[in-house]
Amino acid sequence: MTRVEESDRADFLAAVDQAARASQGWMALATVAGQEARVRIVHGTWEGDSLWFATSPDSPKAAQMRANPSVDIQFQVAPPDFVHVLVRGRAELCSDDETRKRVWDVMDYDLSAFWPGGPTDPGYVAVRVVPTRIELSKMFGSQDKRVWRSG
């Protein structure tokens, strides 16, 4: 395993973004409900060092993230290299219109299929994941493992 130094962070994040896009943005999101993990598939998009996805403010995952913002994420992997992206961090639910409008434009798929009212739809909230750890590797973590940690 290679630890990513702060001086290499921008290049590392660019490689993470490229790997996430190769997976078409689909990722498994784990939240905590009481003492149990809950996992579901969501679509995420990187913007610099933030990972964004969208949900309803009334969804079970939103309630779970409000109660416990710790999340774990794994992006879909595929042949031939089985590039593996893992993200651990803290979720922030962003309901202000300025952020929701910006994230609406940042997302790399059409959110209007879920929220026809657009970026100010009351049923839409942007979720920012602030990473504390990001792992990028090949062959499910067995090759070329690079890890960035905050702090």
Image (tube, rainbow, N blue to C red):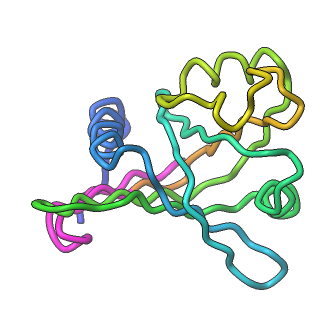
> Which portion, as a residue range, is magenta?
135-151
Where does the image place residue 25, in percent across and percent down from the top left?
42, 45
Above or below, comparing residue 99 to residue 91 in the picture? above
Question: Horizontally, is 42 left or right of 114 in the view?
Answer: left
Q: Nearer the viewer, residue 99 or 132?
A: 99
Where does the image place residue 28, in percent across and percent down from the top left?
51, 63
Q: Quadrant of the N terminus?
A: bottom left
| Residue visible at 63% across and 24% down in the picture | 103
Question: Horizontally, is 11 left or right of 6 in the view?
Answer: left
| Residue visible at 81% across and 54% down in the picture | 62
Question: Horizontally, is 112 left or right of 51 in the view?
Answer: right
Above or below, comparing residue 87 to residue 38 in the picture? above
Above or below, comparing residue 101 to residue 108 in the picture? above
Question: Horizontally, is 68 left or right of 37 in the view?
Answer: right
Hey, which residue is sitting farthest left in the picture?
80
| Residue visible at 80% across and 23% down in the picture | 117
Q: Nearer the viewer, residue 105 or 70?
A: 105
Q: Nearer the viewer, residue 111 or 113?
A: 113
Majority secondary structure in the magenta region: strand
Residue 143 among those drawn in magenta: yes
Hey, which residue is sitting farthest bottom in the picture?
35
The mark total stands at 0
Residue 44 among those drawn in magenta: no
| Residue visible at 70% across and 41% down in the picture | 127
Rendered image quadrant of residue 142: bottom left
